[in-house]
Amino acid sequence: MRIFATALVAFIILSGAARAADGDDAGTLALVDDASFDAAFQCPETLADADAREAELHRYAAWAKAMHPDWSFRKRLDVRYGLLRRHACAQTMANIAAAARPAFAP
């Protein structure tokens, strides 16, 4: 179940990583330390719409790439998951859990 959830999050991050940020944002994100990024983090369910949620995910991907180029893909997933847990993003966590359940459970 956790493997499927991880794969789902991985797909989401990979699908947007190529379009993560334009040049100006990438330079600005390179100046944001871990504590500041954590403090500014917003749960996806609190954002206005799907476009805002996607933009925030791209911002995270760009920040992680700029600030931690040595992080593996798994590490980036784990940190994102940790942010969701630490900020009590209940709806997003429930969506991840629901996506990890088999479609035709016994």
Image (cartoon, helix red, strand yellow):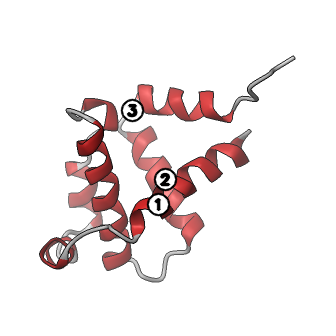
Q: Amino acid at mark 3?
A: Cys
Q: Amino acid at mark 1?
A: Ser
**Real-space Cα separation, disc 3 to disc 1, in angstroms:** 22 Å
Q: Write the residue at 42% across / 82% down.
A: 69
SS type, badge 1: helix
Q: Return the residue at label 2.
A: 12
Q: Quadrant of the C terminus?
A: top right
Left or right? Give the position of 50 relative to 31: right
Left or right? Give the position of 90 relative to 95: left
The circle drawn on residue 15 is 1
Q: Where in the figure is residue 47, as x and y percent of width and height?
A: 23, 35
Q: Earlier in the sequence, mark 3 or mark 2?
A: 2
**Real-space Cα separation, disc 3 to disc 2, in angstroms:** 17 Å
SS type, badge 3: loop
| Residues at marks 1 and 2 touching, judged by CB atoms closer than 8 Å | yes
Instruction: Sort mark 3 into few (<14), some (14-19) or many (20+) by Cα contacts within 10 Å.
Output: some
Q: Earlier in the sequence, mark 3 or mark 1?
A: 1
**Real-space Cα separation, disc 1 to disc 2, in angstroms:** 5 Å
Q: Write the residue at 56% across / 57% down.
A: 10
Q: Amino acid at mark 2?
A: Ile
In the rendered image, the vertical position of residue 105 relative to residue 24, given as above or below: above
